[in-house]
Image (spheres, rainbow, N blue to C red):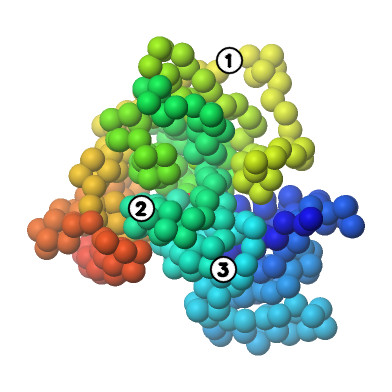
Amino acid sequence: MQSTVSILGATGSIGESAADILERDRRLGAGARFRVRAVTAGTKVAELAAVARRLGAEMAVIRDVGSYRALKEALAGTGIDVAAGEEAVCEAAALPVDRLISAIVGAAGVAPTAAGIRAGNDVALANKECLICAGAAFMALARQMGVRILPVDSEHNAIHQLLAGHDPAAIDKLVLTASGGPFRARSAADLARVTVEEALCHPTWSMGPKITIDSATLMNKGLELIEAHHLFAFPPEQLDVLIHPQSKVHAFIVFRDGSWHGELGAPDMRRPIAYCLNWPERAETATSHLDLAEIGTLSFEKPDMQRFPALRIAREALARGGGSTTVLNAANEVAVAGFLGRQISFMAIPALVEEVLEAADRAGLLHEPESVETALALDGRARQLAKLRLTEAA
Ligand code: NAD
Ligand code: MG
């Protein structure tokens, strides 16, 4: 029996890695394990048409309505259905599949992923912003629909593997590793001057621009603590971060008796994606296997919250709970776009996020969103506050 799959964000970094797995599988012909239903993208018509053809998808959907005709032309004669617009992306997410790969970047991924969950689709979740923006409500919706959320994010994927079969009560803490990003060894004075080009140069992972900047500020690791809290239902004080520059160990779980268990693998997202597609089975992947003797040394250090305030700010938002992480996520998306657009400096990213959190608190906005829709409404309010500050700061 073939499993069916759709990819939201098929033209991105995660989308491409997923497409690589599915294309290799498709070459098996009658022995192929997967069949692709929908692929979606934001604006990249040519790339979307190409991936739809490569994977033999049933349907290709572009979010940008103005690109409908171009996509239709690019796929003429293929028999692949074409649609455009935000609603069409949600409809594509709701086509029944065994796995919905959620790999849109940012809170733009929340509504389509929620539409997929409402249709009863199990989700391979790369879009961590679903959990930062709408955490409790998002997980409640998944529980209510009886769908499984399999984490693609490498650290959470590692924890998913490590926790299997263990009683959570036996576990003292979950430890996420972080590469430390390109600026791990920079002084505070240096950090104030880093350029967009330097920040986009990640030492160990090749990823889309937004998460690459989040990795440079360490906001990504803060977002991942929030993600872990919702996925695994561990309280914030049982979640920890260790800097590990080689990115070979993706996470540890630490038992109450002091035993540490880690998951290791090459920094290649095709491994966690394949895990989520094949779960509960395992399949071979095209990723290289680790040669630990050649690597020789694995090192670990504490994160520096003084030089990287984004991690502290995210931790505080997690501890405070309610709408704090929704606001944190929205403000961070606006700030990162402002940095990439060269409107603000690198260190202005965490500063802007903190200011927006304070403003949202003063405006009484930080109560818990009771549904995914109220989380998205709060996301919209927080973006307004952040954009106002961005124009003041620029
Ligand atoms: P990316 O920027 O490379 O790709 C984003 C995809 O989303 C593209 O296909 C784009 O067309 C689509 N998209 C963007 N805006 C959209 C919109 N408004 N509506 C519909 N589609 C839209 O991003 P990425 O690096 O692949 O990351 C995707 C998600 O996975 C992010 O949430 C990120 O945090 C998470 N993630 C990525 C990695 C990685 O290695 N890249 C690792 C862990 C988690
Ligand atoms: Mg990660």
- List the residue tagged with mark 2: 135
Instruction: Give the mark toward the camera: 2 or 1.
Output: 2
Q: CA distance from mark 2 to mark 1?
A: 37 Å
- List the residue tagged with mark 1: 297
Estimate the x, y position of residue 317 in percent, counting from the top left. Answer: 25, 45
Task: Name the residue at 43% across, 44% down.
Answer: 231
- List the residue tagged with mark 3: 93
In the foreground, 257 or 132? 257
Q: CA distance from mark 3 to mark 1?
A: 43 Å
Of labels 2 and 1, earlier in sequence is: 2
Task: Tell me, for residue 40, which label it has, or none.
Answer: none
Q: Are circles 2 and 1 on residues that touch, CB within 8 Å?
A: no
Q: Is residue 231 above or below residue 352?
A: above
Instruction: Give the mark toward the camera: 3 or 1.
Output: 3
Q: Image check: 96 left or right of 210?
A: right
Disc 2 is placed on an element classified as helix
Task: Name the residue at 67% across, 81% down.
Answer: 82
Estimate the x, y position of residue 335 in percent, counting from the top left. Answer: 33, 57
Of labels 2 and 3, earlier in sequence is: 3
Q: Quadrant of residue 26?
A: bottom right
Identified by mark 2, the residue type is Gly
Disc 3 is placed on an element classified as helix
Residue at the bottom extreme? 69
Disc 1 is placed on an element classified as loop
What crowding class fits label 1: few (fewer than 14 Cα within 10 Å), some (14-19), or many (20 or more)?
few
Disc 3: residue Cβ within 8 A of ligand 1's nearest atom: no
Q: CA distance from mark 2 to mark 3?
A: 19 Å
What crowding class fits label 2: few (fewer than 14 Cα within 10 Å), some (14-19), or many (20 or more)?
many
Q: Is residue 362 above or below residue 204?
A: below
Q: Quadrant of residue 304?
A: top left
